[in-house]
Image (tube, rainbow, N blue to C red):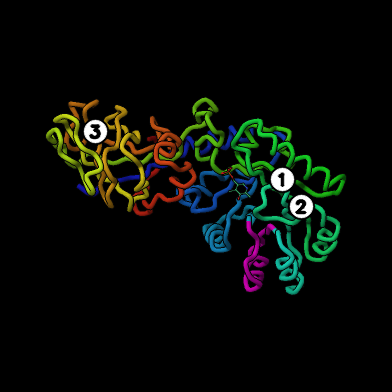
Amino acid sequence: MTRPARAIIDPQAASHNLQLARRHAPGARVMAVIKADAYGHGIARMARLFDAADAFAVASLEEAVALREGGSSKPIVLLEGPFEAAEIATIVGLGLEVVVHTFEQIEMLRAARCRLPVWLKFDTGMHRLGFAPQRFAEIVAAARACAAPLRFMTHFANAHRRGDPSVAAQQLCFERMLGDTAGERSLANSGALLARPAAHADWVRPGLMLYGVSPLDDEPAAALGLRPVMTLRSRLIAVRRVAAGEAVGYGGAFVCPEEMPVGVVAYGYADGYPRHARTGTPVLVGGVRTQVIGNCSMDMMTVDLRPVPAAAFGDPVTLWGAGLPVEDVARASGTIPYELLCRVRMRAHYSEGAP
Ligand SMILES: *Cc1c(COP(=O)(O)O)cnc(C)c1O
């Protein structure tokens, strides 16, 4: 038997989620965000499964090169733009679009004497990337020399909270700044795509929801009609009985309150499971929901088999995905689903199909 840890990617769930995004934003084009190796799902695979998107968005030139080498001829947007002037020849050669958020980048483009599609990014309140709206006229004038066409973008800080007033405030700031300036506009990530139709504009930029994970706090993916694309599976490689008062695993973080069955799963932090997942983090054994116990180790973890007394060597275990939302695992381990997904390190052990 080969080591049974697997990431199973469900192609039908991927196209279902993309269609759902389109149904929510029928007037907008969809830029599928596939940065961070498509949120841990594999960028080449997800570019193929999201072939119905209108464009792709990535965070680095390396990712864009990989997409072009894989045969993608779609528009590709570099979400952070060029990092250095040396990238510009390749960017132009591959016909990429760039986000431009600093004067240094405008200078790089002007010095290269090129013209390419530019998304000017404005900081309407998140205070991460973007030009100050107060300098709009000056920036547009500087960018015109190297941008064709010129488009406009901003990003929300709190779109994951339905009805958060800062989202409306950021949108208003963006619209006031632009006035009737010509050029396509993009504001919405997954949260705003689902919860703020007024912000759809010309292009939506969904990431997380395309992978079937809820972008909205306290709203389960299933209730939003999303289907998880990634299911992490492994098996029990040992079933033990441990006496009352005995501690399990490194550091003895879990002490058995009674004599109890304990399962050992071939999955660990080297596969991307969160090392800081505490006792109580949900896991499915043979479809039954139970809990992680003790500290996760590099290639293994231990689970409470009391709710599944018939569990045996070889039984299937789901770490997250179909039947167990990654949102639940993230909450129990003090992080967000984005981080869990993009840390999955299973490159040699992905397969495609229904989970
Ligand atoms: C990552 C990213 C997105 C996608 O965000 P989700 O919350 O995953 O939908 C959209 N826009 C920008 C600029 C991003 O960096």
Query: Residue at left 66%, top 69%?
Result: 88
Residue bounds of the magenta highlight: 80-99
Earlier along the polypeptide chain: callout 3 or callout 2?
A: 2
Residue 292 location in percent, x, y?
A: 29, 37
Residue 282 visible to an observer of this rendering: yes
- Which quadrant would residue 334 be assigned to in this image? top left
Q: Is residue 317 magenta?
A: no
> Is 325 placed left or right of 158 in the picture?
left
Residue at the spot x=73%, y=62% of the render? 116
Residue 141 left/right relative to 265: right
Which quadrant, please, contains the C terminus?
A: top left
Q: Tags 3 and 2 in contact by the CB under 8 Å rule?
A: no
* Residue linked to disc 1: 186
Q: Amino acid at mark 1?
A: Ser
Q: Which percent across, then down, holds residue 159? A: 63, 38
Amino acid type, mark 2:
Arg
Residue ID at (82%, 62%) = 144
